[in-house]
Image (tube, rainbow, N blue to C red):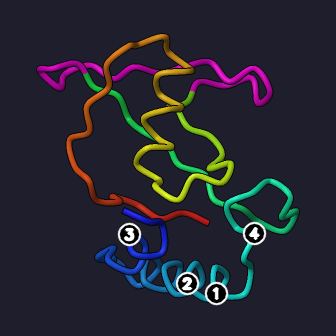
């Protein structure tokens, strides 16, 4: 699903998420380069939480730039499907060959 459709379809669970969703949509409409790092104001990224099959463990990675533990994720780099971005980044950052999404929907928006 393309990023604008996915963000528009997102169902906010709080007033803050609703405000963030509207900010995203306005920003996207005013910035055709939102999928590229060339946009120095802001650009889209996508991330994933990776659970084991029984969902009782979470895989974290160490982020060398920020010197902290985190979930996987990265820049869209022109890809319009943010789910595919999250899957690509999860594979690249962990070495996993198979990553299966639990949902096709965005679960959180963060500015």
The Cα atoms of the two marked residues, 2 and 3, are separated by 11 Å
Asked if residue 54 is among those painted magenta in the image, a careful observer would answer yes
Query: Between disc 3 and disc 1, whose residue precedes?
Result: 3
Q: Label 1 belongs to which residue?
A: 29
Mark nearest the camera among 4 and 3 is 4
Range drawn in magenta: 52-69
* CB atoms of marks 2 and 1 within 8 Å: yes
Q: Which mark is residue 6?
A: 3
Q: Position of residue 2 (x, y in %)?
A: 44, 65
Q: Quadrant of the N terminus?
A: bottom left
Mark 2, other Cα within 10 Å: few <14 / some 14–19 / many ≥20: some
Mark nearest the camera among 2 and 1 is 1
- The residue tagged with tag 2: helix, strand or loop? helix
Q: Quadrant of the C terminus?
A: bottom right
Q: Label 4 belongs to which residue?
A: 33
- The residue tagged with tag 1: helix, strand or loop? helix
Mark 3, other Cα within 10 Å: few <14 / some 14–19 / many ≥20: some
- The residue tagged with tag 4: helix, strand or loop? loop
Mark 1, other Cα within 10 Å: few <14 / some 14–19 / many ≥20: few
Query: Between disc 2 and disc 4, whose residue precedes?
Result: 2
Q: Label 2 belongs to which residue?
A: 25
In the picture provided, is 69 more to the left or to the right than 103?
Answer: right
């Amino acid at each position: 699903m393309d990023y604008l459709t996915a963000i528009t379809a997102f169902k906010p669970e709080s007033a803050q998420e609703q405000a963030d969703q509207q900010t995203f949509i306005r920003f996207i409409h005013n910035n055709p380069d939102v999928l590229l790092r060339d946009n120095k104001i802001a650009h889209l990224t996508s991330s994933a939480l990776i659970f084991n099959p029984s969902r009782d463990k979470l895989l974290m990675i160490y982020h060398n730039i920020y010197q902290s533990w985190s979930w996987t994720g990265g820049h869209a780099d022109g890809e319009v499907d943010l789910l595919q971005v999250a899957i690509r980044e999860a594979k690249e950052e962990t070495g996993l060959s198979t990553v299966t999404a639990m949902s096709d929907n965005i679960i959180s928006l963060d500015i």
